[in-house]
Image: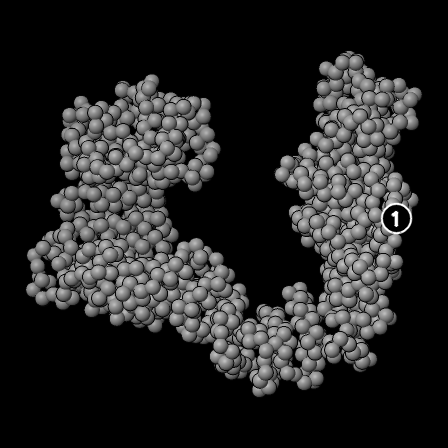
Amino acid sequence: AVGPIEKSRKHQNPGKFARARAEPSATRTTSSAFPKVRTTALPSFNEAGDKFRTFCCSRIHATAVSFFYQYMLSPRRLISSPQSAFQDSKLDRACEAIYELCSASGYKHVAKEFPHTVQDLHAVYVTYISLDSSLHMKLWRTRYSLLLWLGVLLLNPFDIKSIVEDDTTFIAGLFQSCSTALKDAGPTREAAAFCLATMLNRKDVPAVYLEKLVRQTAVLVERLTTENKNAFQTLGAVETLAAIFKRGDRTWLLLIARKAFEAIRPCFENWECGSFRSLKHVAVKLAARVGISVLKPRSAPWCYSRGKRALLENKFKILDERKDHIEDESDNHENIGLEDGRFQDMLESVMETLLRAIVDTDTRIRWSGAKGIGKIASRLPRGLADDIVKNVLSLFDDTGSRDDDNAWHGSCLALAELGRLGTLLPVRLPEALSALTAAITYEFRRGNHYVGAHVRDAACYVAWAFARAYAPKVLAPHLPSLIEGILLTAVFDREVHVRRAAGAALQENIGRQGFQIFGDVGIKLTQALSFFTLGSRDRTFVEIVPAIAKLGYWELLFRKIIKERIRHWDSPIRHLAAKSLYALVSSIDDKATRHGVVHRVILMLSDLVGQSRDLASRHGSLLALAHVTQALGTLDSNHLSEKLSAIVPRLEAARFYRGKEGSLVRIAACSLIAALASCGCQLTVKAQLRLLDALDHSSSHAIEAVRIAAAAAARLLTTSYFAISNSNFISQPGERLLSRIVLKYIGAIREPATANASRGACNFLGALPARLLIADDSTLDAIVDALLVRSYRQDVVAGERDAETRRDALIALKHIVSAIRSRHLTESRVLKLHSAFVQSACHDFGVDQRGDVGSWSRIQGLQAAVNLSAVLHHRRKKARNGSKDRIVPCLVGRAIINSHLVLAARPFISVNSRFRWGGGESEELCCALLRNMGEQLDATRSISLLLMPEFFQHAPAVPRKKQIEVLLFTDAKKRDIPGRLCACLVLGGFYHDALLDGLIQSAGCGDSKISCEFRHALVQQAVVMSKSLDYADRIGLAKALMLKVRALNRPVPAWSVEERNRFHLPFLRCLAALVDAGALHPIFQTDVKGSVATGSLAYHLVSSLSTLIASPRLAKQVSKTCAAADSLLAVLSATAATSPLLANLSLAALVRSLTSPFPRIRAYVAEQLYTRLIELSIVNECFLDTEKLSLAQVLLGNAAWGVSTCMFHLEDTVSQLTQALVINNDDVDIQKPARRTPQRSDELDSYTCLVRDAGY
């Protein structure tokens, strides 16, 4: 049977059910999935609530609620008679799922789909009151769903007497239960308010309960304001009254209207000092509904009504509107105004409350106040409503409210509601549009930031509402100015939501109001300013502005940029404004017009730069001048050249570089110098040197952006004015010029005062033109040698190692190689550069507090090396065409180059030219690229992967080039990057070692997703190689790992300590993973006899690990010691049944680590060894019998390994372990900590000793 609510809803919207029957298949699929849900899967709703709230579709609510309702009743989960401590787990799960639906789209939408069979009313009520009170906090979702269901069931039109047996008891009990639930702080309070309001709105419920609720509310509000008690109960009571006044019968509401308003009046007496904002929000909402209830429920006939609003009406005809003026007799019409004159004073208090609400600091309160003002004004006589309109408009003209952004925002909301409901008559429209124009550009400084984005957003909403509220004939006189204001906001506003709001208002005004005025231009405007195009601020400033300028708004946009945007408080907006100005000037096709515009901008802004004390104005003006000058292309005017060249000296004379954000002015000044140089500005030699001096001062600045801008400007300045060429001959620079520029920077690099000076000098040398670099061989060698010294990883600048200097030196060398080309790259220079790029920079693993700063040098070294190979290869091509005797091809089979390079079986062509770049150099660079492809950092991997194709295209004689291309690029679709890199391990030789170093670093760096992918790929490839038929392939990986373990035991130079420390921990982790996976099984399988194993590869590996874990250098490094223990534990498990000698060696090293003085190491090794011994107890043919393993497990489990004070008591336990595990006592040397004599110390010594002993 169809209930009454469904009947009424079906009658109101008959097409809804027809659409539901013809719903697309996606909805049916979702709906049909619900009956298949298992009961055990219901708790997942709570766990995946966030994802469900994000992706929930409102169309599944009806099916979902229906399913859970059927689930609760089949078998029936509700009870018909009261019980004590009732609980049903399946009912709780269904209610949890219903709550997730409510939290996804609100309980109002979900409650409509609740079942409303009247027979369920008593069962739901009995189930609710029978819930276990001891589980109050656990079952709140169940109580929430049942209260919502009760509220829906109480909407039925039948008398309660015909539904329940004892209606009096039922009503009293439900009132008491809901009143108790109003005390909850969570969503249950909202459901209780909904249920109680639904019940009290019924005609068959005695009015005494409503009066009782009002009295309770008055008491609670009074107690809250005086004693600050029962805050949530008060909030629930006020929410209930607000819901009652929303849908209740006016006949009853008039009887309690004054009492209800007096009950909440204390909430408004201390408006600014209140802290419970949610209560004030609901109180304002209730006050507005009380005011509406005492007015006659019909709109005033004097209100403006546009009539039909079809968009086609704007094109074919103008609708007839009512006259703006109404006779005064209509003001006293009996159908509008107060229902009773006794409420006049109360209505005045309500309006005062709402007018104060629209200036509140809370957005919710302002919005509720604005809606209340609009609805009440639409039911008042014209004179009173006009007073309200004037009061709202007066806030825009009040000078004292200029800095109150909340007042402006609330007034805009109220203005939109007044216009939308027809209360704002066309007579007041000019004043309203004047206020709208001021609000749409509102911005006020407060401290170090500006506010006003929400005001501009509300102003756009006002413009949108006006477009829908008024006919085209009314808005036509004001539409052009309104469109211009909205257009500028949509294009140039800082916030994305304001731009999109302005775009929506523009589309609404053009579509409904301006079709006849704008025509095709309006359509193009709406297409250009769509929702998605306005989402990107950069795209709006740079791309949309020129497109709109072509529609006839060039001058409007130009004035907006010059007067406001380049002086904006936010520096990114000033940068974008300068780019937008460049786009506007570049869009001018006529050269004379463009020159006039540039002349106009320079005259307007040149004086502002040197005179304004505002940093934003100076910075924006400099950026605008630089971009406009660059847009001009060629500057022929001497007058303008003099004005522009004098700007930078004036800035320095006025000391405008100092102060907060003075670096922005420096960067803008460097941009202006670069623009002058790029457009060929006519400068005297004195002016050129003066600008160069300005760049010198900025080259050693502490901020990197300033140094980069100065170097970029120096590149253009020196290229334009100091690299003069006549025909094909480049004149040699003079000694004075070389001393002024080149030698000065070389001296700054060799003996820098600070690190910043060294960085700036490197940048400047890299920016010099070829004419200054190749003045003579000694100058070029001095430049290269100075930069090479600064690029080495062990270099020290001003007493410290500086990563930025190394990076900038490598960048400078890369630029120098590109500038001088291959003609001046002799053999010695090429070898030096190759060594610096590949052997030094690519092995820079420096670390400081910022992280892996050596990656900067590695990236730049790879780029510089590939660039060097490209430059040399370009020269080799020309030599091949011209002089063939310079290239000597030689076929090499399995030859050995440099005494260690094993080449592929296929011969390749090795080029031995005057540059000495052959197979050895190519292989070294290819190894560096492959190693960095497997590095931990994403930036290093991506850049290496991008450089590899370029390197293969230019570099000569790369060994196994074809195989690498196939493995890395041809099979790219079959596997991911880690798999492709691991597949390259089959190349062997130095490629194998380089790849293994990089892969180990990524696979053992941690537990991140990319680390797990690399670890899985490495283990999988190692297992495949271990099963190869070729003996060299089977033991190749094991041999490499053994050599690396030995390398960890040997002392290394100081410059390699960082590389070893970085490699140590990831290598041990990968070694343990490889041994556990069985990748080294071949070497352990051969060691069956103990006498043979002493000289085998596996024996050397285990002995190296034992030496490593016992080394004093590793003793204090807890994480590395634990990782070495993991490797030995893996070896123990792998050799327990195949090689007793290796297992005994591993076990002896592990027992020796139990004597470590650090508790963390002892506890970790004991725990892991205990676990491994349990696994060995079930291994067949284990080298230890079960009794010995059990005794060792007991000894390990009973000792307190993690306590630092009992080290002397553990000696007996270790001795018993050695006997139980059949270990020679000489192999276990107990590390007895030295006994310290008591010394007098301060109070922090105990904590220091604790940290040291714990191994932190």
Question: Camera-side residue: 836 or 917?
Answer: 917
Label 1, secondary structure: give it. Answer: strand
Is any part of residue 354 visible from this angle? no
Please name the colour scheme applied to the rendered image. Answer: one colour
Type of amino acid at the residue the image marks with label 1: Cys
Residue 302: x percent and y percent?
Answer: 14, 61
Residue hosting label 1: 890
Residue 817 vs 256, above or below: the answer is below
Q: Residue at the location (28% across, 44% down)?
A: 239
Residue 840: x percent and y percent?
Answer: 81, 53
Q: Is residue 1067 left or right of residue 606?
A: right
Q: Which image quadrant for residue 98?
A: top left
How many numbered marks have been drawn onto this rendered protein structure? 1
- Position of the N terminus by quadrant: top left
Q: Residue at the location (79% across, 60% down)?
A: 878
Is any part of residue 873 visible from this angle? yes
Q: Residue at the location (34% across, 26% down)?
A: 67
Question: Camera-side residue: 586 or 1233?
Answer: 586
Question: Camera-side residue: 258 or 744?
Answer: 744
Residue 246: x percent and y percent?
Answer: 22, 45
Question: Camera-side residue: 821 or 1013?
Answer: 821
Q: Is residue 1137 left or right of residue 703?
A: right
Q: Residue at the location (78% across, 78% down)?
A: 731
- Position of the C terminus by quadrant: top right
Q: Is residue 1175 left or right of residue 783?
A: left
